[in-house]
Image (cartoon, grey):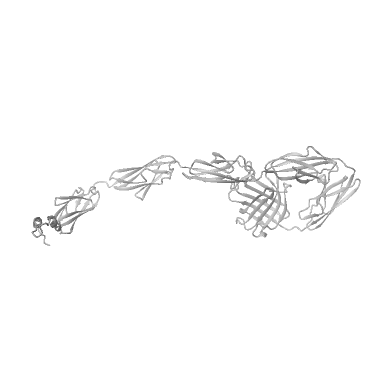
Amino acid sequence: MRRTPVNVIASLSLALLAAAGCRDAAAPDQKPSALLGGLTGDLTVTTATTGSSLDPDGYTITVDLLQTKAAGTDGSVTFSGLLAGPHVVTIGGVAGNCTVSGGTTRTALVPLGGTVHVDFSVSCAPTGPQTGDLNVTTATSGSNVDADGYTVTLDGNTSRTIGTNGSVTFSGLPSGNHTVVLSGVAGNCSVSGGTSRTVTVPSGGTASISFAVSCVAQSGNLTVTTSTTGSNLDPDGYTVTVDGGASQAIATNGSVTFSGLSASSHTVVLSGVAGNCSVSGGTSRTVTVPSGGTASTSFAVSCVAQSGNLTVTTSTTGSNLDPDGYTVTVDGGASQAIATNGSVTFTGLSAGSHSVALSGLAANCTVSGSNPQTVTVPTGGTASASFAVGCAAAGGDGTLTVTTSTTGSNLDPDGYTVVVDGGAASQPIATNGSVTFTGPAGDHTIALSGVAANCTVSGANPRTVTVPADGSTSTTFAVSCAAVSAGRVTGQGQVGTGSPTPGNNVQTFDFDIRADLTGRFTGTDYGDLHPGGVPATLTTDPASDPATSFTAFRSSSSVCSDPSRGVEIDGVGREDTGGLVSYTLSVCDNGPAGSGADYFDIFIPSEGFRRSGAVTSGDIVKS
């Protein structure tokens, strides 16, 4: 294309300017600027820079040596309102390590009413090291400082662990801007100025940045509440202890608050609970106290009436002992018959003093010592009272012949024992046999003992027989025995979850009981603690403790979904306090060991005590 000489275009531009300065006769009010408006255009200059060590302050663009504007290393500027025609464009301020492709000067022809574009391509060579280092420092103050320190992350992809008061260095980083973030800061700590920083790493040098962290003490509060029901509530309340140290007194129905505890798990123990009271779920709790908040825990306590037992014993010597024994009366009300040489127990008496009287003595018998007596019954224990009776002779001797007649099946192989006057005299007797006693004339109580559980005595047993002076009399015991059916139930395990340790709501059992009313049973309630923190126990073992016994064996139980899989046993057991109590044991063999399907229930009517539930470990077997 043929180019128009610059001087020609310049002359044309000057001519146009002169023409614009003259007035048009047809339009005398036309202004020169209005005329020039149609003779201008725009010039846009673009810079594009590549390479390293780019010029940090960019460049300058000059048009016709008259107008100058700054331009970035990669950017554009526009000159508006230039006269249409040629213009000289120059790029300046180029760093020594950079070169401009095609030179630093361009000639551009600005079109009428349009825009012409001029491009400068700049390439820069390295001027020195292109990498640098970054040192990050932390300074932490306050309480409960984060034990595991923090994490420093560079540009979202490179991380280092840093101590609460420490430093790390990132080496060989490209020079320029980088983002540094501190993370892993505990909730009780804050970072001054925020956790994110932007830092410029210089070429060949080291940049530094620091994070100042302050931490406040982590603490919270704990409120403990007690709720107590039942009778004979503990009058002096209880004591709450946290972590074996700080303690506060608490009412039977009340609450206390421990303030400023560390935000963590704490052990809370309720102590000072009276022996007649038990704590649901045990006396110990683990509670997590939140930072800046309040945790709460409660203890539900139930108390039973304070009671104890009283055992009364009689010891009678002499002749012509009272054949029908005596009567023991407590506080002029409750009475029980007692043999001339025997004992009876009153259970569930209120703790305190009681009056005990022995009555029904024969005229020839007297009580040695006080009658009535005053006895103090302890809470949860057994008091005792004894009466020594002496009887004088009341006439000549006579003889008594006792005969047994036994029918049926499974007769008692070792026979029986005939007992006279509660133990004044006794003799063994065969299942079908006779024995003779010689002694004082008068009324005598004759009892047949040692009768097997499958056998029953027809008529009164014991019975009263009158022995004539210098004469003889007789009495016969008719015994019938039924066939003994096989039956046995065994069990060993626990009810409740957790370990069988004092304070846990767990009951363990171990028993082997047969239909012939032999065997043994032991139960332990770890949630029912007696003074000294001793769990309550109940034991029946006639072999080692003849005062205990099994009195009934039923081969089904209504507590089981399938009654035929159950067994019910009535028994008399001895508690760890020494007292004897009657109870009913109901068990269900619903599945194999460890299935959790078996069931255990024990009820002590005199105490209103019941524990029951699914067998969580162990097994019950009915055979």
Whether residue 174 appears in this view of the structure is no
- Residue 66 at x, y percent in the picture: 14, 50
Q: In which quarter of the image is the C terminus?
A: bottom right
**In the rendered image of this protein, does residue 582 appear above or below residue 393?**
below
Q: Nearer the viewer, residue 588 or 330?
A: 330
Depth check: 228 or 315 in front? 228
The quarter holding residue 342 reads top right
Q: Where is residue 226 in the image (x, y as percent from the top left)?
A: 57, 44
Left or right: 550, with 139 as reference point: right
Residue projecting furthest to the bottom: 1
Q: Can residue 335 be seen in this view?
A: yes
- Is residue 429 or residue 128 the one in the foreground? 429
* Left or right position of 361 against 311: right
Q: Residue furthest right?
A: 470
Q: In which quarter of the image is the N terminus?
A: bottom left
- As rendered, which of 394 and 546 lies closer to the eye? 394
- Counting the numbered discs, the total is 0
Residue at the image point whose x is 65% and y is 55% from the top = 620
Measured from the top left, where is residue 81 in percent x and y? 16, 55
For residue 367, above or below residue 69: above
Residue 240 picture location, percent across and down? 56, 41
Picture quadrant of residue 594: bottom right
Location of residue 137 by image quarter: top left
